[in-house]
Amino acid sequence: MTLRLGAVGPSADDPSAVLFADEAAIHQLIAQLRRLDSGDWTADLTDPPGASEPALRRLSVRATDTPLHVHLSGNVLHIDGAPAHLNTLADYLALYAEHNDLNEPGMHCHIDTSDPHADEWVDPASTPLTIAGWVPDY
């Protein structure tokens, strides 16, 4: 089965990186985040739906000893963080998938420092991350 997982980086209109994923891809990402105690996991990305910005080509998730840090390097979206923080991200994504119909346009969630508890697990220098369903919002 091919996972529908794509991403674009920040743009002039939006400082967030946006990761587009269908339900199967969200669950695969959750599983990878929960099992990553050390090392890294990478996935090739496809062109996201309806994106007007250049697509990113790879997702790299790496276990470190730091707060969650999202950043871009070339055409790679990096998500680095301590296993506990990667698990927190997995928990957020599980709630997102559980409470939203990912086949409806506009379904998304934000991982950034605007969350009142973010200072406990998200690096303040992290690029804001939006996780969006595969169905474009138009």
Image: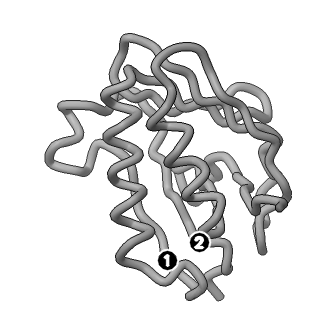
Q: Position of residue 126 (x, y in %)?
A: 43, 32
Q: Position of residue 101 (x, y in %)?
A: 49, 83
Rendered image quadrant of residue 79: top right
Q: Position of residue 134 (x, y in %)?
A: 67, 72
Q: Which residue is mark 2?
A: 133
In the displayed structure, would residue 84 be above or below residue 108? Answer: above
- The kind of residue tagged 1 is Met
Indicate left or right for 22 with 63 as reference. right
The structure residue drawn at horizontal position 45% and vertical position 13%, both measured from the top left corner, is 64
In the displayed structure, would residue 95 be above or below residue 105? Answer: above
Q: Which residue is mark 1?
A: 107
The answer to which of 77 and 9 lies nearer the viewer is 77
The structure residue drawn at horizontal position 79% and vertical position 35%, both measured from the top left corner, is 75
Indicate left or right for 76 with 94 as reference. right
The structure residue drawn at horizontal position 20% and vertical position 33%, both measured from the top left corner, is 119
The structure residue drawn at horizontal position 29% and vertical position 42%, both measured from the top left corner, is 113
The quadrant of the picture occupied by the N terminus is bottom right
The answer to which of 7 and 125 lies nearer the viewer is 7
The answer to which of 33 and 14 lies nearer the viewer is 33
How far separated are the C-alphas under marks 1 and 2?
5 Å
Q: Secondary structure at mark 2?
A: strand
Rendered image quadrant of residue 3: bottom right
The answer to which of 83 and 128 lies nearer the viewer is 83
In the displayed structure, would residue 113 be above or below residue 68? Answer: below
Q: How many marks?
A: 2
Q: Secondary structure at mark 1?
A: loop
Tags 1 and 2 in contact by the CB under 8 Å rule? yes
Q: Residues within 10 Å of mark 1 (few under 14, many from 20)?
A: some
- The kind of residue tagged 2 is Gly
Indicate left or right for 118 with 126 as reference. left
